[in-house]
Image (cartoon, helix red, strand yellow):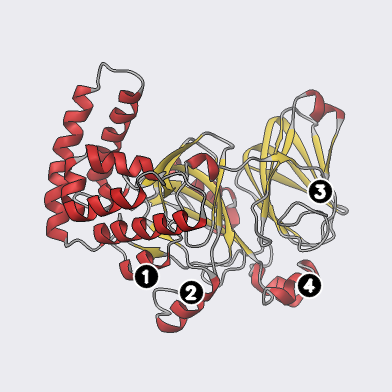
Amino acid sequence: MLGKVGVESAAAKYAAATQSSGFSIEKEKSYAELWMGTHPSLPSKDVETQRTLLDLVQDNKSLMSHEISQKYGEKLPFLFKVLSIRKALSIQAHPNKKLAERLHSKDPKNYPDDNHKPEMTIAVTPFDGLCGFRPLKEISHFLGSVPPLRKLVGEEAAKQFEEAVRGRETSSALEDVQRNKKALQTIFSALMTKDKSAIASAAKDLMAFAQQASESSSEGEGSSDGKKELAKLIVRLNSQFEGDVGLFVLFFLNYVKLEVGEAMFLKADDIHAYLSGDIIECMASSDNVVRAGFTPKFQDIPTLTSMLTYSYAPISEQKMNPVDYPFVTLNRTAYSASSSAILYDPPIEEFSVVRTQLNAKGAKATFEAIQGPSILICTNGSGTITVGPKTEIFNEGFVFFVGATAECMLESEGDVFTTFKAFCELDGKETANGTT
């Protein structure tokens, strides 16, 4: 299994916090995901009534606002998750809306809904993963310096790629960008369609190469540190998925590390693979995944290689730049303790996320009412949540739904109280382009 084991899994710890759920952690079992939302595969339930959140918002459309309810088919437009990753998740991408509709119609077993799935990842613990295609110069460098990679893709394919992009790697001219993307698609498709025996043989050579690279750079600095890190990554991933094509895909994708609170956004059709760490994830409400490596599950390589955007850029362009959330009021205690409410606002309308950290007992954050629904989870510490006349205890792992037009106040009961709030509001304060 891919999730962290027992109490090491944040997803499991948070799920076990709600005692009435009947869930208890088995110390030897792995737990990968906690879902929060109305997705029909696993809708959240009200603790007291055990009614699903899907039932509740469909019965009372004002909980989401009539506009959001109508636009998104009486379901929450986002799915909120906690992921606890011990072993690499699959190399994958999520289809855009039109492709999702076609895939669902053709193969509903493997593509269970017709929605797209852009997603945002926020690190709760240190995280690493593969995200988007590397700058073309880096890919060319690996083709020239990693013999097992060049041998596997083929000398002719490698040369064609190098010649196609040479001198144009960073050009912004539309013609050059289109040519570069076509060249990248051609060589990446050549890699992904190699037969398993060729991949397994090349992987053995790659392991020997990685071992040699690690030893030769063991006393070096600077660029050799990156070489040694990459060699260790190859060894680590091979121990999880021996002889997998993903060992070679990593030379094409950015290797990204996120520290706690850092985030990245993935558009539909962006390739990625999460490797380790605990994260908060928010996405459009879908469970569609097109896989092509690091997985025993169904793989759809033709769809993956044809659907990708083949955009190439350094990882810095996919990391998000959160800003202070303007529609919250912190009390004096919160300000004096350097508390914060940070907004992660991707360029889509389905969701945004606010991370609130209250750093002293009695610190308060009062959120103005918005014209849309919210889901909040506490990831550290304890406090209370007040909506209207009702105040509830808000411990680590507790999850609350807050309906549209309701003011919400959080108060810390200790030195730390960290929450994440996913929300949607189509009109008014928070929009995709940041306007009001």
- What residue did someone put label 4 on? 67
Please name the residue shown 58% across and 67% down the image: 43
Disc 1 vs disc 4: which is toward the camera? 1
Q: Where is the C terminus found, in terms of image quarters?
A: bottom right
Q: Amino acid at mark 4?
A: Glu
Q: Look at the numbered disc 4 and give the secondary structure of its residue.
A: helix
- What residue did someone put label 3 on? 386
Q: Give the left or right position of residue 421, taking residue 105 as reference.
A: right
Query: Would you place residue 288 above or below residue 366 in this image?
Result: below
- Gap in angstroms between the C-alphas marked 1 and 4: 34 Å
Q: Nearer the viewer, residue 189 or 52?
A: 189
Q: Give the left or right position of residue 168, taking residue 196 as reference.
A: right
Q: Amino acid at mark 3?
A: Thr
Q: Amino acid at mark 1?
A: Thr
Residue 348 % position (x, y): 65, 59
Q: Amino acid at mark 2?
A: Leu
Res. 365 image quadrant: top right
Q: Tell me which numbered mark, 1 or 4, is placed earlier along the sequence.
A: 4
- What residue did someone put label 1 on? 303
